[in-house]
């Protein structure tokens, strides 16, 4: 028999190997004894060398020649189907595994609890006199939606959409009423805030500003914390997303500083990293409360207050005037408090300023894109502050973003990829829309009147009611995983109760907005920025809750005492 040449070819896309033997002569065309059984065609024949062969052909799929072997002068070529496709030779156990049902949808336990809560309110709790059936049905759907935000049977946007769908299907709301909040200017201002934050991060401008402060104040670990905290307060008015500042700017900088000093997540975390992470997180509440445009929840709070008739003239300046004293004092005292409660092992960092200086040297002068962000955001913030020609904040933001798109600083594809912005648009609109409809149906006023009457019967004056409601609002946040979610769900009701008890409208509206920023660090799930810093792995969970409770209480008392005195001076009450 003449020699043979063996070749092997691997086809990755088909997930099989092909092995062939090419004889020197061709086999005869004649074939005999072909049979078909269970989808396989079996043919026996002899080639020109007189060697008996048997081939197996699958009738339904492409085949691959897998092995060739010779036994007692007889070569057999075995053909098998692709491993990636189903065939007649698939084992019963493989079939059983592939057909096993696996639930991939919502967390059924959390979904049942959320829906069950709404059904219990709707069908078991008696509807009070003075509340129309439509309002009671909407309240049940609203409470089930809010419960889902806490228990998370689905992502927030998906669960909110289910709630909205339920309201429309049950004819509790019309389609126009259900989607009416999609045109809310504050929601779109929050969406634009996500886009602005992407510009700061992608161009590196936020990183540059933070590094400049590290160069000036970074000779000690405490100085580093002050440099980073103050730089965030400077960035905040033009970067209206606390979470974006945390994840896009400060987490990378703090991680780099910590690791360069031998502080990694784990045993060495407390050398420096854990202290810087906690200080930045705890100070972010003051940075966000300092300016109206520093956080998404600020804008939402003012919008909801306006729905109850609390309209603040020249809101940016009025906000800053009321927040500046407690906010700046908080920025100065919070790092010291964390330093005492959670001291770093490394307290001197003489090399940090030199590292920052070297980094700035490598960055060089402002790039074209960075300069474009500086110019466009300067114009936007100017319009936010002074509102020339009566331009509202959302129009100012639209104008600023249009300039960045036109200049190519940010691409439209970047905006489309900002999933957090579009997710926020959906679930914010759902909660705000339901809350607004509850207000229109008279339910919010009904609750406010009842609670106010009960507090009055207890002989509580408005300052006492004001304090009790604020303490309650703070404590409730332990059940929420989002600051903005709590604002959308509860702010209107709490404001209405304050107004019904005689709290001065301006004081009620501004303090509720300030307050929302102060509990964003009490747990690892309290806010987006808290989750970002916790995810770094530098701070243990027990320390998160301990520091969150102590510093949170400190912040609350600071704003209540120092802020209360300052608000009296400027005439808020």
Image (spheres, rainbow, N blue to C red):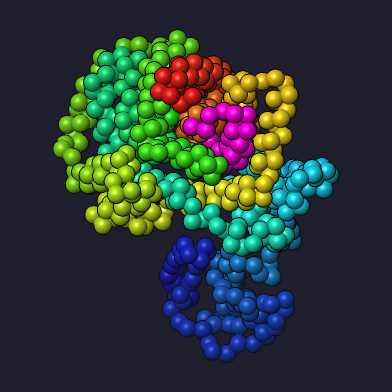
Q: Is residue 449 visible?
A: yes
Judging depth in this view, the residue of 213 and 63 nearest the camera is: 213
Could you tell me residue 222's position as x and y percent?
A: 35, 15
Could you tell me residue 415's position as x and y percent?
A: 38, 54
**Residue 328 quadrant:** top left
Q: Where is 252 relative to 564, above or below?
A: below
Could you tell me residue 226's position as x and y percent?
A: 34, 19
Residue at left offset 45%, top offset 16%:
565
Q: Where is 404 relative to 515, above or below?
A: below
Asked if residue 485 is among those painted magenta in the image, a careful observer would answer yes
Residue furthest top as drawn: 340
Asked if residue 158 is among those painted magenta in the image, a careful observer would answer no
Q: Magenta: predominant secondary structure element? A: helix
Judging depth in this view, the residue of 416 and 543 nearest the camera is: 416
**Residue 338 quadrant:** top left
Question: What segment is highlighted magenta in the picture?
Answer: 482-506
């Amino acid at each position: 028999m003449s020699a043979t040449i063996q070749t092997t070819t691997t086809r990755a896309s088909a997930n099989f190997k092909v092995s062939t033997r090419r004889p020197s002569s061709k086999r005869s065309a004649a074939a005999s004894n072909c049979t078909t059984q269970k989808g396989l065609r079996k043919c026996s024949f002899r080639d020109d060398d007189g060697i008996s062969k048997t081939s197996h052909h699958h009738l339904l799929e492409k085949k691959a020649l897998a092995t060739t072997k010779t036994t007692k002068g007889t070569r057999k070529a075995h053909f098998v189907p692709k491993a990636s496709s189903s065939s007649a030779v698939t084992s019963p156990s493989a079939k059983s595994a592939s057909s096993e049902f696996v639930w991939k949808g919502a967390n059924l336990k959390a979904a049942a609890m959320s829906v069950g809560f709404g059904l219990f309110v709707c069908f078991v709790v008696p509807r009070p006199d003075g509340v129309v059936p439509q309002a009671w049905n909407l309240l049940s759907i609203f409470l089930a939606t809010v419960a889902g935000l806490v228990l998370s049977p689905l992502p927030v946007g998906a669960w909110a959409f289910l709630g909205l769908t339920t309201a429309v299907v049950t004819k509790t709301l019309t389609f126009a009423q259900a989607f009416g909040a999609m045109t809310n200017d504050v929601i779109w201002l929050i969406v634009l805030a996500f886009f602005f934050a992407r510009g700061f991060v992608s161009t590196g401008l936020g990183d540059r500003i933070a590094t400049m402060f590290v160069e000036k104040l970074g000779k000690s670990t405490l100085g580093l914390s002050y440099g980073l905290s103050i730089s965030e307060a400077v960035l905040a008015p033009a970067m209206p997303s606390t979470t974006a500042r945390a994840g896009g700017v400060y987490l990378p900088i703090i991680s780099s500083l910590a690791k360069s000093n031998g502080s990694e997540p784990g045993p060495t975390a407390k050398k420096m990293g854990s202290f810087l992470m906690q200080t930045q997180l705890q100070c972010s509440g003051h940075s966000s409360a300092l300016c109206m445009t520093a956080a998404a929840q600020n804008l939402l709070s003012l919008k909801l207050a306006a729905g109850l008739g609390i309209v603040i003239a020249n809101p940016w300046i009025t906000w800053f005037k009321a927040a500046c004293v407690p906010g700046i004092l908080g920025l100065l005292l919070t790092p010291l408090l964390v330093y005492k409660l959670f001291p770093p092992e490394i307290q001197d960092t003489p090399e940090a300023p030199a590292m920052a200086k070297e980094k700035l040297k490598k960055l060089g002068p402002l790039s074209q894109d960075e300069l474009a962000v500086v110019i466009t955001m300067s114009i936007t913030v100017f319009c936010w502050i002074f509102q020339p020609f009566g331009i509202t904040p959302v129009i100012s933001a639209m104008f600023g973003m249009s300039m960045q798109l036109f200049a190519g600083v940010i691409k439209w594809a970047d905006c489309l990829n900002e999933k957090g912005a579009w997710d926020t648009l959906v679930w914010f609109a759902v909660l705000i829309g339901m809350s607004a409809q509850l207000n229109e149906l008279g339910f919010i006023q009904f609750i406010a009147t009842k609670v106010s009457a009960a507090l009055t019967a207890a002989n509580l004056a408005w300052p006492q009611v004001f304090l009790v409601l604020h303490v309650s609002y703070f404590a409730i946040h332990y059940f929420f995983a989002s600051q903005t979610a709590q604002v959308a769900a509860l702010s209107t009701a709490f404001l209405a109760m304050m107004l019904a008890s005689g709290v001065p409208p301006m004081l009620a509206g501004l303090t509720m907005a300030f307050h929302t920023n102060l509990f964003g660090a009490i747990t690892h799930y309290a806010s987006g920025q808290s989750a970002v810093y916790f995810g770094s792995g530098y701070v243990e969970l027990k320390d998160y809750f301990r520091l969150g409770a102590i510093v949170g209480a400190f912040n609350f008392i600071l704003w209540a005492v120092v802020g209360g005195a300052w608000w009296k001076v400027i005439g808020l009450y």
